[in-house]
Every structure is written in C-alpha cells, then in structure tokens.
Amino acid sequence: MINMYNRSMLQDKLNEIGTETKCPIAVMMRDGRILTGQRNYTKDKWKDISVWTIPGGRCDAGETLEQTLLREVAEEVGITEFTIVDFIGETRGAKEGDTVFIFFCTTDQDAELMEPEKFSEWRWITKDEYFNDQGYGGFNLDAHKMIEDYLRLKA
C-alpha cells in the first residue's frame, strides 16, 4: 500500500516537465512477471550494442514525465491500460547527462513488438530471472540495482 507521502511524491514526479535528457521508464508487472525487451542500438544512434531493457524513453518538449511514460509504453509495447503505482527513484542514464526516472506499474495487457527496427523481442520474466541473470540489467547497473531492491522489498 502507498502511504500519502509516497502518493504525493509519485504525483509530483509524474507532473514534472521533461527535457530531452529526462527518461522515464516503466517497471511493468503482470502476473508477477517483469516486462523486458531486447533493444538493438546502432552506431548512427549512439553505439552498436544490444541490451535487455525496460519500456520507456526520452521526453518530448513540453511533456510531463507521465505523458512521456504513457506515450513511450504505448509506442514500444502497445500497452495502453496500466496503473502507475509508485515512483521507485531516479539515477543517471547510460548517456552522459541523462537522468532515468523509474516507475513501478501494473497491467493486465500483453506486450506486442511495436518497433521491430529497435527491439528484437519483449518477454515477461520472473523476479528471480531478473535478479539472477545480470544480462537483464541492460547497460545501467544503477537502475537495475534500484529496481531489484524495490522488487525485493515491495512487489
């Protein structure tokens, strides 16, 4: 259960106006499983690397973190009905100057591969898989640690 302090902090974060360096992500849970996707970057976008990641992305000009989260989740995985339950925290992004805002969300919808040019697949994994397979940490170990700590304590 979320206490009033956490609910107020959650709403404050969701209402925060984004910039091109703010990247909200959704730790999406369904039936006790976490949604993760194989993201394929290319050198023309940043660097040539493939990593497991969580849905989310950069804010467009004037968007709040909530608007970005809703848009990015719909664009990447086709999930349009979900509940933003809690604000886990924020940490530095993988790119210099970026900040990642981590939100815990739940849904009953399944994920679809909406952007095959960016992602190879999306899959629902158990918490144990997320905890024990460091490959699911992507390229941001600080974010992975925050998510893991949250899931061990609250979810």
Image: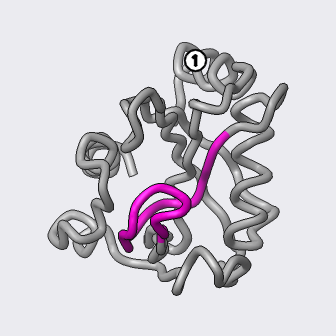
Which colouring convention does the figure follow? one colour
Q: Where is residue 66 in the image (x, y as percent from the top left)?
A: 74, 36
Count all numbered tags in the image, as a single digit: 1
- Residue at 37%, 30% (x, y): give it: 91
Indicate whether 34 appears above or below 114.
above
Asked which secondary structure carries label 1, the reply is helix
Q: Which amino acid does label 1 sit on?
A: Met
Q: Tell me, yes or no, whether the highlighted magenta stretch contains residue 44.
A: yes
Using a 10 Å C-alpha cutoff, classify the residue at mark 1 as few (fewer than 14 neighbours), some (14 to 19) or many (20 or more): few
Task: Give the residues drawn in magenta, as a range.
Answer: 41-58
- Residue at 54%, 63% (x, y): give it: 44
The dominant secondary structure in magenta is: loop
Is residue 54 left or right of 7 when viewed as pictured?
A: left
Q: Tell me, yes or no, whether the highlighted magenta stretch contains residue 40.
A: no
Is residue 149 left or right of 118 when viewed as pictured?
A: left
- Residue at 52%, 46% (x, y): give it: 104
Q: What residue sits right under mark 1 in the picture?
A: 9
Task: Determine the image quadrant of residue 93.
Answer: top left
Is residue 75 left or right of 100 when viewed as pictured?
A: right
- Residue at 58%, 31% (x, y): give it: 22
